[in-house]
Amino acid sequence: MNPALPPEAVVPVLRLQNITKRFGALVANDSISFDLARGEIVALLGENGAGKTTLMNILFGHYVADDGTVEAFGKRLHPGDPGAALKAGIGMVHQHFTLAENLTVLENIALGTQSMWRPRFDRTEARLRIGRLASDFGLAVDPGALVSALSVGERQRVEILKALYREARVLILDEPTAVLTPAETEALFKTLKLLVGQGLSIIFISHKLNEVMAVSDRVLVLRGGKLAGERRTSETTRSDLAALMVGQEPSLPPIVDVPFGGRVLVLEEVSTAGKSSGARLDRASLTLKDGEILGLAGVSGNGQAALAALLSGSEPPTAGTITLAGEQRQPWSTLEALDLGIGRIPEDRHAVGTIGDMTVAENLILESYRSPRFCNRGFLDWDAARAFAEEIIAEYDVKCPSPDTRIRLLSGGNMQKLILGRALDPAPRIIVANQPTRGLDVGAVAYVHGRLIEARDRGAAVLLISEDLEEIMALSDRIAVISKGRISSVTKRGQRSIQQLGELMAGHGLEAAA
């Protein structure tokens, strides 16, 4: 809590009492109670599926609790009414942004804030007000820019400005750093300090222990839908919070030097048009070897998606050569990529990795339904599909009621485990892992890392594409950097410092290192 605030600021601005929410047999929230004070940042910490987002959706009115009450500034909120939450001064920035890409920043922020009976929208007044908010809270963004042209960090600023424009006094941030670069995360934290300095209260939903320790005043830990504990941040440790969250702080698998095999994939001066993936590849060269994890670091939007699309068969090259297993190849399709032994873990598990309204079993056979294992004389063998799903659920420790569960009902971590199981069975020769731990908690991260190391140890070539430099440094045998579609030379782990890699990610000296 901000120490400069007067004693009356101790009065809670929010009070949740005995909140319970069930989805069938699943108890997502089990009698959870807590208060939020003025000028306080409370971190809501927990594993994927612990019930954090469900609880905040109840607070904001997207869900109706089966039991319990929510009070804002001493008045009880009408359940299931986002309008009532907004009117009470509660704003929410979702993990997946809710912006209209074909509208400008100004239009997105002001949309729905003026009466339909008002004859004319006063753009000048709105622009001035947005400018004042942006200046006061370090949220620089061009009001006239189209949202489709903004970076991820800029889009998040627009979401925060939307809430402030509506005079939010309580701000809920759901996994706000999941898609941000380290520099954008640091800028966000500075903004949060400015906000609480003006008396706003913030609920910061996260599973990242280091961020929780850096930004919060108090930490609430959810585990299995229950409130497992509460700590003052200044009086706790990362290990203590990890123990509350998952039982103990998971240890990452040991990384040892391994002998590399032959060159399984070689890209030479490859370019793409960038049609399906935004930023294009520009004369990119890369060699991937059997039995290694090659880490590719880079800031989002610098050609990583184009490279993953190229290797997965969804985007052809416009120039350069590709050699696979010693044979120069023409572009392949997505189906041919699978037949060639290329497994993929896509960057966006919601939009690309899964189909939300399909079942777990259906999603698990999406890339292999034509195989004899699941197809008999042109008909799908659903018994075999469900049996396979049960194997993956058991082997990858997926918290899932049954193979017939709609996959959109699962947490991000459990969804990612299913994608991992699908990609690694049967064992591929090449694994394209694009942001494989984005948005996952510390336990799920350790699990994914362990599986990738197992694949490497059995001889697979793993291309790890990540914006997390700590992950790249910890997991990779060799490391390269991508910036503006160009790829640097590859070095062994430890030969370049994090600072040197960061400079290459910013484009400094990349031409010399390519």
Image: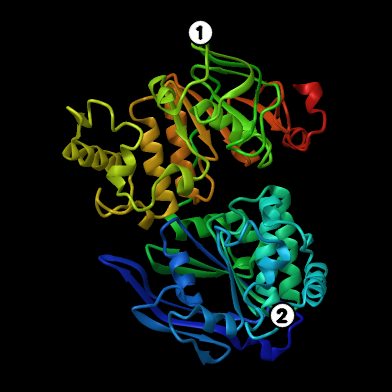
Q: Amino acid at mark 2?
A: Gly
Quadrant where the C terminus is found in the figure = top right
Outermost top residue: 326
Q: Amino acid at mark 1?
A: Glu
Q: Nearer the viewer, residue 238 or 52?
A: 52
Residue 45 in the figure: left or right of residue 418: right
Q: Using the image, tell me which numbered label, if any, was put on residue 327.
A: 1
Residue 358 in the figure: left or right of residue 131: left
Q: Which residue is mark 2?
A: 199
Quadrant where the N terminus is found in the figure = bottom right
Q: Earlier in the sequence, mark 1 or mark 2?
A: 2
Q: Residue at the location (21% across, 42% down)?
A: 386
Residue 276 in the figure: left or right of residue 124: left
Q: Secondary structure at mark 2?
A: loop
In this picture, is 365 found above or below 160?
A: above
| Mark pair 1, 2: CA separation | 64 Å
In this picture, is 117 found above or below 154?
A: below
